[in-house]
Structures are given as structure tokens and as C-alpha cells.
Image (spheres, coloured by chain):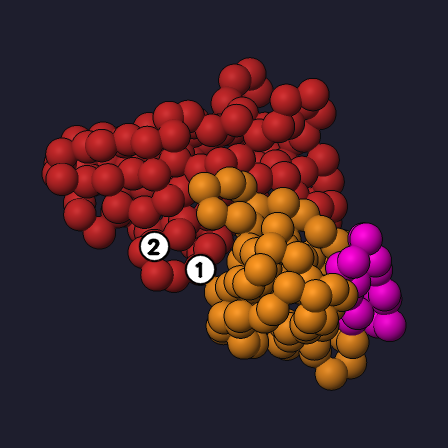
Amino acid sequence: NAGVMQNPRHLVRRRGQEARLRCSPMKGHSHVYWYRQLPEEGLKFMVYLQKENIIDESGMPKERFSAEFPKEGPSILRIQQVVRGDSAAYFCASSPLSGAEAFFGQGTRLTVV
Amino acid sequence: ILNVEQSPQSLHVQEGDSTNFTCSFPSSNFYALHWYRWETAKSPEALFVMTLNGDEKKKGRISATLNTKEGYSYLYIKGSQPEDSATYLCAFKTSGTYKYIFGTGTRLKVLA
């Protein structure tokens, strides 16, 4: 049973480009969380999704950021028109139930140049 | 705004020492508290899921306690080893919400 897989591990984008971050949850997990870690800061909640539904996106910036978790395939965090301030590590976690322990992926480190 | 605070921010101990750190959270509408261990360049690894006031959990030399009435949890490491060096995170959830709010962690360095 593979763990939570995130790809790419490292992503470099120029200002104005789009970034797509992928997260494949553990087998049997239908709950996905995305967190962002800015330099020198802790993990900040972004969004919580179940299959085909966004349940809580209270941590998502209002513009340029979107997330989905389709019926088939990985969860995608999409950042349009990236800016330097988007440079961060983005972590995804999955769990089988809402309150159960979450298993984290190794993160995608986004660098905007 | 819900806030989770961890103290100390960082800690250096000698190999063999026992140590503990604190996670403080709002005491109302408590649902669950998780502890994670996060080594550099790896993903956070779940240590404990705590849900009941008075819970005590143990895994090897690491244990944790929970007091939901006063809003704190302690993590203890007995006989610290260099491989215990990591950042220890706690994450808190209230009932009726879905997100876990993380503290900024305690960075532990065990010196050989």
C-alpha cells in the first residue's frame, strides 16, 4: 500500500505561469487535505476535499487558487498566474475518515522565479 | 480565530535526557488532537490521535497526555536519542469543522 504520493517534488515556475500540484491519496482514503508551509512558518490549512466535493476551502486565497478531487485520479491544486509570494512547500494529506489520523505526502516545493 | 501554540519553539537536549513539550489549544468544542513527528526532507508522520480528556498514549519511549478542559497536551520523550531529532507538531480540530489547525512545532535536537 503506497503512501500518499505528491508530484512533482520540486516545481519551478516563472511569474504569471500556472502551477499544477498533484496528490494521490492512500488507497481507500477518500478525504484529502492541502496545507501550505511558507518559509519560516508552520503548516497552514488550505482546503479539505472529499471525492468530487470541496468541503472546506476557508484557507484558500480568494483568487488564482483552486482545488479539485475528481471521482477518478489524483487531487489537483492549481495556482494560476503565480507570483513570488506563492513560493512555498505544499503538502497533501489523506485519511479514510474525517477525524482519523492523516497521512502526509512528501510535499511539492514550488519556487516562483 | 483558533490558535494552537506549541512551546518551546526549539530545544536542545543531551542523549539520554528525558524531555517534554506542550501544545495549547482552545478548550471549547474540542474534537481531536493529533501529534506528528516531522523529520527534515520527509513528510510528517502521525504519532498519536487523542480524543478523550485524560487520554494517555504511548509508543516506545514517546508518550502523550491530553487535558481538554484546560486545553493542553504534553508530549514526553524518555531517554532521548539522536534519532529523535525532529520537529514535533500538534494539530487540533473542533467539533463541527473539518480542518486541523497546526501549531508551529517544537524543534528538538538531541546531541550525542
Going 67% across and 30% down the picture, which residue do you hit?
A29
Say whether residue B107 is left or right of residue A85: right
Q: Residue at position x 17%, y 47% from top? A: A84
The one nearer the camera, B10 or A35, is B10
Mark 1, secondary structure of its residue: loop
Within 10 Å of disc 1 (Cα), the crowding (few <14, some 14-19, many 20+) is some
Measured in 3D between alpha carbons, the distance from the residue under mark 1 to the one under mark 2, in whole angstroms, is: 7 Å
Q: Position of residue B27 (x, y in %)?
A: 70, 77
**Residue B110 visible in the picture:** yes
In the figure, the orange chain has which letter? B
Q: Chain of mark 2?
A: A
> Which mark identifies residue A38?
2
State the quadrant of the C terminus of chain A. Answer: top left
Q: Quadrant of residue B81?
A: bottom right
Q: Which residues are magenta?
A: B50-66
Q: Is residue B65 magenta?
A: yes
The residue marked by circle 1 belongs to what chain? A
Q: Position of B72 compared to B2: left or right?
A: right
Look at 79% across and 62% down and name the residue there.
Answer: B63
Q: Which residue is mark 1?
A: A42
Chain A color in figure: red
Judge whether B27 appears above or below B37 on screen: below
Please tell me which residue lies in front, B7 or A78.
B7
The quarter of the image holding the N terminus of chain A is top right
Which residue sits at x=13%, y=34%? A14
Image coordinates for residue B48, horizontal then vertical, percent:
75, 54
Q: Amino acid at mark 2?
A: Leu
Which secondary structure lies at badge 2? loop
Relative vertical location of residue A59 with respect to residue B7 in this rendering, above or below: above
What residue occupies the far top of the structure in this picture? A72
